[in-house]
Image (tube, coloured by chain):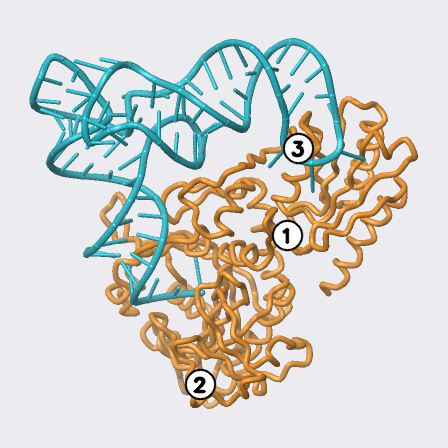
Chain colours: A orange, B cyan
Amino acid sequence: MRYKKYFLPTLKDAPSEAEIISHKLMIRSGMVKQSSAGIYSWLPLGFRVLKKIEKIVREEQVKSGAIEILMPTIQSADIWIKSGRYDDYGKEMLRIKDRAGRDMLYGPTNEELVTEIFKSYISSYKDLPKNLFHIQWKFRDEIRPRFGVMRGKEFLMKDNYSFDLNFDAAKESYNNMFRCYLRTFLRLGLTPIALKAESGAIGGNLSHEFQILAQTGESTLYYDKKLENIDPSTADIEQLQKYYAAVDDEHDPKTCPVEKSQLKISKGIEVGHIFYFGTKYSEKLNAFVQTKSGSKIPVEMGSYGIGVSRLVGAIIEAYHDDKGIKWPKQLAPFFVSLINVNINDEKCNQVSEEIYNNLNHTNIDVLYDDRDVSLGVKLSDSDLIGIPFKIIIGPRDIKTNQVQIEERLTGKKFMLSINDAYNYITNEMKVFSNSDN
RNA sequence: CGGGGAGUAGCGCAGCCUGGUAGCGCAUCUGGUUUGGGACCAGAGGGUCGAAGGUUCAAAUCCUUUCUCCCCGACCA
């Protein structure tokens, strides 16, 4: 992408409406624009990151056996009346009437709808288990939206729903998702902390919330040090659930089973939540399946959510410095920032174009800064938007066919020949894309 | 919803107390000089001062109503 052709409105000063660092950086880097309280437009840069996070979340779902569907944002009130939640959900639910005066709503979650889908087609134990997910915009009319996209009214959520014959199978589905969540967050570059949680409005009796560690998080977590070294491929869920982790208001130093030296305290942001709720919805909405013996029993369900748009803010909270965002490579909107120091220098242009074309042919996302502005502006914009690598092509070094490489995460800077620079970047790209799988 | 704060140019702000017809920095545009970490000089454009009503010869400024946004709390992916 050529910068001059792109739409990337960066700002030196953050609007006064933004309070926390991720919100400020998202506005300054031109990722989002607030439309009204808690509702945002995603500008090109933010949209790229959102899609990358969504892709990783999706891939991990699929790997874990969930099947993707897409349910509508607007739902009819009648299934919510059947489940009893039309009244329970209260003012958080945005209610709408269509032209015929029918009661509709903008979905805050999808238990009812997915149960309706399930029961329309599945009636035998032979078709179980099933696990359906979708990634769709939700709307919750929050009393007070805040922190930018971290607590918006409109947000992108991955939610999935498991259907099983009995409790043991449902528990296996639950544990499968538990593992999937750990893998997903680790792959996003985050340290996930799973906490036993109250299940709130969604209802149920087995529930964990997933927080990620970030200095500016909303809640204070007390947890066993060992949780920081989870290996998702070998982790034993039963074992993991025994590790201590609690939010501050549930932590009691007198009863805490973890030695003081083994106890870590950190701030966290909730990015996921999983629930087992049994037959709560299947009974009310008549989602019954026939067992081997011919009897009909309500299907056992669980639901699992990840706040995809919230993750954008949460990850920035975890990855930034005073210059801007420091995207983990797998999430960066562009992998490399190609900086032409002087667009009026013929050799600089020629070499820049050459590297730009080569990177494009290798399918490496490159932002070519071809603007006629000073080097400082280009460098600080690149730092602000958090691109992992810079290739700096300037008249001084190009005389000896050298370019400078700079790594955003480490601050490492060094000179390479033009060819080596290209090879270095493609190699970095390979290293990180292999480590994902 | 309770408590607090703010709406003046795209962004950040001053002016309001003490009414006299709007200003600064950044950004934008033009010309020139520059160019290795947010350049400089000269010039230019851009605002029904959130909205409505009132007081007054005169309102960004005083009064009333209203809308919006932000922060703290209860709620949540």
Amino acid on which the number 3 mark rests in the picture:
Tyr
Residue B70 spot, x, y in % from top left = 36, 48
Question: Which residue bears the numbered disc 1?
Answer: A326
Asked if A190 appears above or below B12 in the picture, the reply is below
Residue A111 spot, x, y in % from top left = 40, 67
The chain containing the residue under callout 1 comes to A
How far separated are the C-alphas under marks 2 and 3? 54 Å
Viewer-nearest residue: A404 or A162: A404
Q: Which residue is at 71% across, 29% downward?
A: A370
Say which element carries label 1: loop
Amino acid on which the number 2 mark rests in the picture:
Pro
Viewer-nearest of labels 2 and 3? 2
Judged from this view, the residue extending furthest toward the right is A400
Question: Which residue bears the numbered disc 2?
Answer: A253
Question: Which residue bears the numbered disc 3?
Answer: A3
Q: Are marks 1 and 2 on the same chain?
A: yes
